[in-house]
Image (tube, coloured by chain):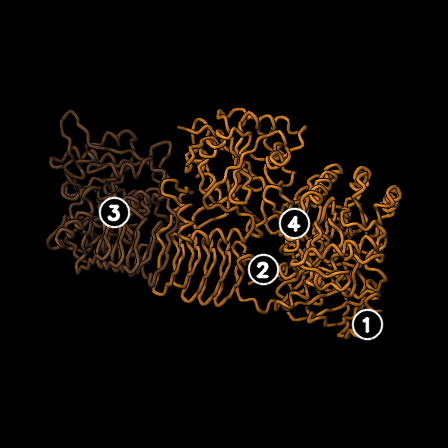
């Protein structure tokens, strides 16, 4: 009997599995040696006798399409019903947290045509063995409108709903406030929701930790048997490989090893996929090795995930940890990297010169790289400001003559060691000896010249494994390297903010003596050239990386970035350990995760300091931000009048910036003098008063490449309330009343009303449920956004780029 | 045309309930996989499969041939089973007789050349060079040959001149004239084949009847020297040896480099094998779905085999779904599909011995 259920396989959202999901959807990730994640979902369909299945993919679904084929393996190549892959009509919508009704409406024919009365909606990336028929029976018995399927306290984004009801929501999606099933279950008061508790092993593959853990879980016999059941098998695409071959020196303990592999080394507590070669004397522990990898003699791996065709060279030790495994890239060659030599080039770096976040990143990244044993060098222009403060300590090295255009220019090179990081400064009277960093008419010429100097300096310095350039100011370095005798030296371009691209005269190319350059325009775009020529690209958060592929965010460079999609990574920045409410000397009362109740003292202190009513029951919204359009001030100006009718809400803002917004904000503050306190100009109050004293920390950014404010707020237990964009989406997880999980509050659209509603619901939680509120504070303070973590990711990434 | 009818008596218990071509090989293959994969890799997709003895297992194994990419629209695999014709002859009396009985199938496609193969050989061969060789020599019959290492008297032995024209052919001679043996693989011009089958009184067998007739009639009969690895696994010993060569001389069959010339086999729906704890797993081939607690030394395990704690398996071939209890010692055996070996059993042989449930029951009775 075929089932009365049709299925919607939701592959529209993309969890962040770092390099692993760069060129594949999570559903196409290999699992347990010979499976792919989607095999579990599809096999559950087959075992539940579901014969009408639609997969809604996102982005590049080639590898998924290739794997599922006609669906024959899962009994889905049929005349009636069968398997459908329904791509998005509009490619320019960034992924959401799950499939939206709008997305379903694009393929309304499928829903109308389906003859089954019930639908199951389920993701493509869960490891489980479930009978959906059971779920349907329970759904019918409970007489619920919607059944949500959960495992323990984990939401699985899996729902059962009648076709009729589902069609209602799909057809009226543009007039509903619910975009997804999750929102529907959360917000709709008139529906009866039933929870089906699945009893057997279930894991959602949301990050590399869960991915590795779940693979290793299959080695636990009592778990393995609940997934690989004889009567409900997991089906996968047929492949041909001979049985695994064990040679003389093989030593195996608790491991799963797939066909075609040849094992002559030691494998402990690991899962090995097809056609892997483990040579004599190599040791693999607690790892997942995908197909066609080669592990050479004497290598030691612990807590690693090796993507397909990785080659681990002789005597290489790779060590990750369970919660943050070491992940290689497809086809990467990994060799010992103790002496990796990296050159960072940027327009600014803390503590020498700082105008924005870039300086913080370069300063802290270089310091942390050195701490991790990487040889790091930074080259900066020698601005006047650096001269005045540091000139005494700089050591003169040598002078060089640089030809730029028809002229010859003299530059002097200075050196300085700062916390074991080697700094070189380029002093040029003609171009770089300026008061400010940017803002000159000849900015493009200045930095083009700087780029030229850096590439010529490579002749004089010890060779590097990799040059890491940042933003448009250094984006011509890759093309200059290609046109020099250093051609072949690998480069990484990190985009910190795509809004600044460096548009210059096209004769700059001639001045730089670059041959065979194809001009598209009257002008040249530094960042675009960098994107086209750097060996690899990165940006400062995984979500921003995804967003840049859409025109709303990526603007004119969307197309160039899409071309380099496979070499484009997102690595989240982190914050220094000096942000710690337990040791911060500037705040009123120190506190930690063990005595959250002390945080209130800082709130009272903030209220007092700012001249607000000192009252612990008032709800304090804090903000530390540049006052510019990007940061979402339009939303604030459009909704705070309504919001502040509630006299229990207070708002504190610290920042500097755009006069237009400042004057509007001042007008707003005048209307609510007892509730709003503005501190314009960065020096007014210590920002840490706000980080430690506010109840929520507001960041309604229109876009946010990474964002550090929310990370600091989390560390101080001040709950971030943010728009789900860029780095905010990677660090702030919304409070889920059902599971009590999350570490803050989020809203989706750049919409004043949506923001206001989320603030109100946060306020309600603050007033009505102190227990959940404190749990959120606890989870916030537990969030790990440390620099150490992001430095590790950079090192992993550098090793994937450097030439072997 | 693939002849898969063989009873394989000499494989004893192994073929008690299955045709020889469906016999297990190398942990996850069946003998028939080799010829079907060779055909698939050679781009030949119109295939008649002549079956006779216990065909059901083979039929259900091959299905539409999709495993070998042979489920094509035109041609594909056709199962040719014995049928009663007007003459009343039913049972095929030999290889040539079987082909003759199904000649109407060949006529259906009316090809210029007919390739005659056998379903129970272990080799990787692209048939195209042989067919090229046949065409270039304007040959009527071409016989594929290989060099026999020992005991040529088991094979059809032939002599050829410098132009690789065959001078003499003797089936299983007592005193072989050369070490060049027929692989039982022939390319015929279709017309010639038809005439030979019609004109011979005794048209039972290619080796015994048809080839000698061709030579007598002074047809163009050429030999094609196959340079690769070839094994006829007609006996328990030769089957055992060919299996063990996978362990000891992997360079012969090169199963591990399968990218260019894969041997396809129908895969079972099992997770990779799981070695839970083992002091020793060396020099062995282990297939999917096995659960291993014991020691595996110089052995081949097919899919779904369970080996419990403190058991030692040595120099042994285990077919699918065999369960072996604790504290067993097994040496130099072939354990047939589905056998259950109770804890504490010792099966130590000097000569390769085939073990199945019947053997084990008898062993149990004797012990009692």
Left or right of A476? Residue A164 is: left
Q: Which residue is mark 3?
A: B337
Q: Residues within 10 Å of mark 1 (few under 14, many from 20)?
A: some
Q: Residues within 10 Å of mark 3 (few under 14, many from 20)?
A: many
Q: Decide which of B68, B217 is in the foreground and name it.
A: B68
Marked residue chain, label 1: A
Disc 4 from disc 3: Cα separation:
58 Å
Q: Quadrant of residue A180?
A: top right
Q: Decide which of A722, A106 is in the foreground and name it.
A: A722
Q: Nearer the viewer, mark 4 or mark 2?
A: 4
Across and down, in percent, residue B337 comes to 25, 47
Q: Which residue is mark 1?
A: A391
Disc 3 from disc 2: Cα separation:
48 Å
Marked residue chain, label 2: A
Q: Which residue is mark 4?
A: A776
Rendered hue of chain A is: orange
Same-subunit check for callouts 3 and 2: no
Disc 1 from disc 3: Cα separation:
83 Å
Badge 1 element? helix
Closer to the chain start, of discs 4 and 2, is: 4
Pointers 1 and 3 in contact (CB under 8 A)?
A: no
Residue at 22 percent of width and 45 percent of height: B184
Q: Decide which of B58, B162 is in the foreground and name it.
A: B58
Q: Which residue is mark 2?
A: A796
Pick the quarter of the image with the N terminus of chain A.
top left
């Amino acid at each position: 009997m075929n089932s009365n259920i049709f299925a919607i396989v939701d592959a529209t959202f993309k969890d962040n599995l770092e390099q692993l999901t760069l060129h594949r959807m999570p559903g196409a990730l290999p699992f347990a040696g010979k499976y792919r994640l989607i095999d579990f979902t599809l096999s559950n369909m087959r075992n539940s006798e579901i014969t009408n299945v639609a997969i809604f993919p996102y982005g590049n679904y080639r590898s998924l399409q290739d794997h599922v084929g006609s669906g024959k393996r899962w009994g889905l190549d049929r005349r009636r019903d069968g398997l459908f892959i329904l791509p998005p009509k509009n490619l320019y919508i960034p992924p959401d947290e799950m499939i939206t009704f709008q997305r379903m409406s694009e393929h309304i024919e499928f829903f109308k045509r389906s003859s089954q009365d019930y639908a199951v909606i389920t993701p493509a990336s869960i490891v489980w063995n479930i009978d959906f028929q059971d779920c349907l029976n329970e759904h019918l018995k409970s007489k619920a409108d919607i059944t949500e399927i959960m495992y323990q306290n984990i939401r699985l984004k899996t729902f059962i709903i009648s076709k009729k009801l589902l069609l209602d929501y799909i057809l009226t999606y543009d007039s509903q406030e619910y975009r997804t099933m999750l929102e529907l279950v959360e917000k709709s008061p008139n529906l009866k929701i039933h929870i089906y508790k699945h009893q057997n092993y279930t894991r959602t593959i949301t990050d590399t930790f869960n991915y590795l853990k779940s693979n290793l879980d299959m080695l636990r016999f009592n778990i393995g048997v609940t997934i690989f059941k004889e009567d409900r098998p997991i089906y996968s695409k047929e492949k041909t490989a001979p049985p695994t071959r064990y040679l003389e020196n093989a030593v195996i303990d608790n491991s799963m090893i797939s066909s075609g592999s040849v094992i002559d080394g030691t494998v402990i507590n690991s899962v090995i996929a097809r056609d892997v070669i483990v040579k004599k004397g190599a040791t693999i522990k607690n790892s997942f090795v995908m197909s066609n990898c080669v592990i050479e003699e004497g290598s030691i791996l612990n807590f690693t995930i090796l993507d397909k065709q990785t080659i681990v060279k002789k005597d290489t030790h790779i060590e990750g940890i369970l919660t943050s495994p070491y992940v290689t890239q497809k086809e990467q060659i990994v060799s010992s990297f103790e002496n990796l030599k990296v050159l960072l080039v940027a327009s600014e770096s803390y503590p020498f010169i700082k105008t924005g976040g870039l300086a913080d990143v370069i300063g802290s990244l270089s310091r942390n790289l050195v701490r991790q044993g990487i040889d790091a060098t930074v080259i900066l222009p020698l601005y006047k400001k650096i001269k005045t403060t540091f000139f005494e300590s700089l050591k003169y090295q040598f002078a060089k003559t640089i030809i730029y255009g028809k002229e010859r220019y003299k530059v002097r090179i200075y050196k300085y060691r700062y916390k074991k990081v080697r700094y070189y400064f380029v002093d040029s009277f003609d171009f770089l000896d300026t008061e400010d960093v940017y803002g000159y008419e000849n900015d493009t010429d200045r930095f083009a010249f700087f780029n030229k100097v850096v590439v010529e300096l490579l002749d004089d310095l010890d060779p590097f494994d990799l040059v890491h350039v940042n933003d448009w100011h250094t984006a011509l370095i890759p093309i200059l390297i290609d046109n020099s005798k250093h051609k072949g030296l690998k480069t990484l371009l990190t985009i910190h903010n795509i809004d600044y691209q460096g548009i210059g005269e096209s004769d700059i190319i001639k001045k730089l003596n670059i041959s065979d350059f194809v001009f598209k325009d009257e002008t040249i775009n530094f960042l675009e050239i960098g994107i086209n020529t750097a060996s690899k690209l990165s940006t400062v958060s995984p979500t921003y990386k995804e967003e840049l592929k859409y025109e709303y965010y990526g603007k004119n460079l969307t197309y160039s970035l899409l071309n380099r999609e496979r070499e484009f990574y997102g690595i989240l920045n982190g914050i220094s350990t000096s942000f710690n409410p337990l040791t911060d000397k500037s705040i009123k009362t120190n506190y930690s995760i063990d005595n959250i109740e002390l945080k209130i003292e800082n709130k009272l202190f903030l209220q007092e300091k700012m001249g607000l009513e000192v009252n612990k029951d008032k709800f304090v919204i804090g903000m530390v931000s540049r006052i510019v359009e990007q940061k979402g001030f339009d939303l604030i100006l459009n909704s705070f009048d309504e919001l502040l009718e509630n006299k229990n809400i207070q708002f504190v803002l610290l920042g500097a910036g755009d006069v237009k917004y400042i004057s509007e904000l001042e007008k707003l503050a005048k209307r609510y003098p007892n509730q709003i306190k503005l501190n314009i100009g960065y020096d007014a109050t210590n920002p840490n008063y706000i980080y430690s004293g506010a109840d929520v920390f507001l960041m309604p950014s229109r876009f946010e490449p990474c964002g550090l404010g929310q990370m600091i707020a989390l560390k101080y237990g001040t709950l971030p309330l943010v728009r789900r964009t860029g780095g905010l989406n990677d660090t702030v997880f919304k409070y889920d009343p059902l599971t009590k999980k999350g570490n803050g509050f989020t809203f989706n659209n750049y919409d004043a009303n949506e923001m206001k509603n989320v603030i109100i619901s946060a306020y309600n939680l603050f007033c009505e449920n102190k227990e959940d509120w404190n749990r959120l504070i606890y989870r916030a303070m537990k969030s790990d956004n440390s620099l150490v973590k992001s430095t590790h990711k950079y090192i992993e990434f550098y090793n994937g780029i450097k030439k072997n | 045309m693939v002849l898969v009818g063989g009873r394989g008596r000499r494989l004893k218990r192994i073929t008690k309930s299955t045709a020889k071509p469906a016999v297990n090989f190398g942990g996850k293959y069946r003998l028939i996989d080799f010829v079907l994969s060779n055909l698939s890799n050679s781009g030949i997709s119109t295939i008649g499969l002549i079956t006779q003895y216990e065909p059901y297992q083979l039929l259900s194994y091959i299905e539409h041939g999709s495993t070998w990419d042979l489920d094509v629209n035109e041609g594909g695999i056709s199962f040719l089973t014995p049928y009663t014709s007007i003459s009343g002859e039913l049972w095929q009396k030999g290889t040539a007789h079987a082909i003759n009985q199904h000649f109407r199938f060949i006529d259906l496609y009316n090809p210029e050349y007919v390739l005659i193969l056998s379903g129970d050989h272990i080799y990787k061969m692209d048939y195209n060079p042989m067919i090229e060789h046949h065409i270039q020599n304007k040959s009527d019959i071409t016989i594929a040959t290989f060099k026999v290492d020992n005991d040529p008297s088991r094979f059809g032995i032939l002599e050829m001149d410098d132009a690789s024209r065959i001078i003499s052919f003797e089936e299983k001679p007592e005193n072989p004239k050369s070490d060049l043996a027929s692989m039982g693989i022939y390319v015929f011009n279709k017309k010639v084949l038809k005439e030979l089958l019609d004109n011979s009184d005794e048209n039972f067998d290619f080796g015994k009847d048809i080839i000698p007739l061709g030579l007598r009639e002074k047809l163009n009969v050429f030999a094609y020297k196959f340079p690769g690895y070839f094994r006829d696994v007609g006996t328990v010993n030769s089957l055992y040896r060919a299996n063990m060569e996978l362990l000891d001389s992997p360079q012969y069959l090169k199963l591990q480099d399968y990218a260019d010339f894969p041997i396809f086999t129908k895969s079972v729906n099992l997770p990779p094998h799981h070695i839970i704890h083992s002091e020793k797993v060396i020099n062995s081939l282990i297939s999917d779905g096995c659960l291993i607690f014991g020691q595996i030394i110089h052995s081949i395990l097919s899919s779904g085999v369970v080996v419990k704690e403190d058991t030692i398996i040595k120099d042994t071939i285990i077919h699918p779904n065999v369960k072996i209890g604790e504290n067993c010692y097994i040496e130099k055996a072939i354990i047939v599909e589905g056998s259950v070996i109770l804890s504490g059993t010792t099966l130590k042989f000097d000569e390769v011995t085939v073990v199945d449930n019947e053997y084990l029951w008898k062993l149990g009775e004797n012990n009692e």
